[in-house]
Image: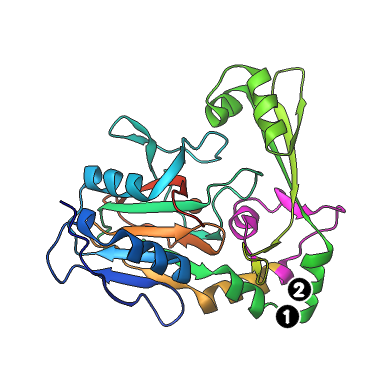
């Protein structure tokens, strides 16, 4: 019988989100699901702490609240498959910091929702960071609001044959072309079967209810990784001054999550950006699932 244990909650920080604590020493699977859904819809991000979940419990819990799990095909980083489940993946395989971003906003089809699970916390540092992307928009100067409302972003990238085969999980260029067409991405195939990709998108999106402009996307980390990857759609440069204003806003409104073993994080990928601080040890092992909510959203 389902117990529907009530939620014990407190603010995750003074900026964003809620934390659900396990004061009654129950299984996370016995929590009142409607209460979770209501709190997720109002808060955008929930951290479940103290439930001593393992990866199986994490998988079952996320299955119970989500649908349409993605296997990260089209994603740009290397991820390991966990437990032979193509929809439970490690986070990417390098240690650098990753600036705040919405997941997979460099293509049209994005997961609406993300789950993170802490299999092993880092010894120190390596925090995951989150922020409210509607708050991010509010913090922009008036001139930046005008600029990003007027101009779209253009992402360009080059992939050799080995690279695109890994990224799109196929050896068939036809499949790549089809996937890119569905994703609003232009593909140019070169003689050596390398490809060039081009994708345009806004930096500011309306919220699902249409009432709150939301500054969300991949601009901050993309620009950090390679300044040539993304600029404005008219060919003009997104300058260092612009980026430094954006990075400053990001720091001002960031909440850091110092992982504890078994933590589960539930994120609305249309409203909350995430990233991470630099990793300094080899222990940190965090998993991710990309999906949609299985409830009206
Ligand atoms: Fe991410």
Query: Which percent across, then down, holds residue 20?
Result: 28, 69
Residue 92 visible in image: no
Residues shaded magenta: 215-242
Answer above or below: position of 61 versus 143: above
Residue ID at (64%, 21%): 175
Is residue 13 inside the magenta stretch?
no
Q: Secondary structure at mark 2?
A: helix
Find disc 2 in the rendering and name its residue. Answer: 145
Residue 99 visible in image: yes
Determine which quarter of the picture holds residue 167: top right
Q: Are marks 2 and 1 in contact (CB under 8 Å)?
A: yes
- Image coloring type: rainbow
Q: Secondary structure at mark 1?
A: loop
Res. 188 mark: none
Q: Which of the pair 50/245 is nearer the observer?
A: 50
Find disc 1 in the rendering and name its residue. Answer: 141
Q: Is residue 211 left or right of residue 73?
A: right
Query: Which percent across, then down, holds residue 94?
Result: 43, 47
Q: Is residue 169 left or right of residue 206?
A: left
Residue ID at (22%, 53%): 29
């Amino acid at each position: 019988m389902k117990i529907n244990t009530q939620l014990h909650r407190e603010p995750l920080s003074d900026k964003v989100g809620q934390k659900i604590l396990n004061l009654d020493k129950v299984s996370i699977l016995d929590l009142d699901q409607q209460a979770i859904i209501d709190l997720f819809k109002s808060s955008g991000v929930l951290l479940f702490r103290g439930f001593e979940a393992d990866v199986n419990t994490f998988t079952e819990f996320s299955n119970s609240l989500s649908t349409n799990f993605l296997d990260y095909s089209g994603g740009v980083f290397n991820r390991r498959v966990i437990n032979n489940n193509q929809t439970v993946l490690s986070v990417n395989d390098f240690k650098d910091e990753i600036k705040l971003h919405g997941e997979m906003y460099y293509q049209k089809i994005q997961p609406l929702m993300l789950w993170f699970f802490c299999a092993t916390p880092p010894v120190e540092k390596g925090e995951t960071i989150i922020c409210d992307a509607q708050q991010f928009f509010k913090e922009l100067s008036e001139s930046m609001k005008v600029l990003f409302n007027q101009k779209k972003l253009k992402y360009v990238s080059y992939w050799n044959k080995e690279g695109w085969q890994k990224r799109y999980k196929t050896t068939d260029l036809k499949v790549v072309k089809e996937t890119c067409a569905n994703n609003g991405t232009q593909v140019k195939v070169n003689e050596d079967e390398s490809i060039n990709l081009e994708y345009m998108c806004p930096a500011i999106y309306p919220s699902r209810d249409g009432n709150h402009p939301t500054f969300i996307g991949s601009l901050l980390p993309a620009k950090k990784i390679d300044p040539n990857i993304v600029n404005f759609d008219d060919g003009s440069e997104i300058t260092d001054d612009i980026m430094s204003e954006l990075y400053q806003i990001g720091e001002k409104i960031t909440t850091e999550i110092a992982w504890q073993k078994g933590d589960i994080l539930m994120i609305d990928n249309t409203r909350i950006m995430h990233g991470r601080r630099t990793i300094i040890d080899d222990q940190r092992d965090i998993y991710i699932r990309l999906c949609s909510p299985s409830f009206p959203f």
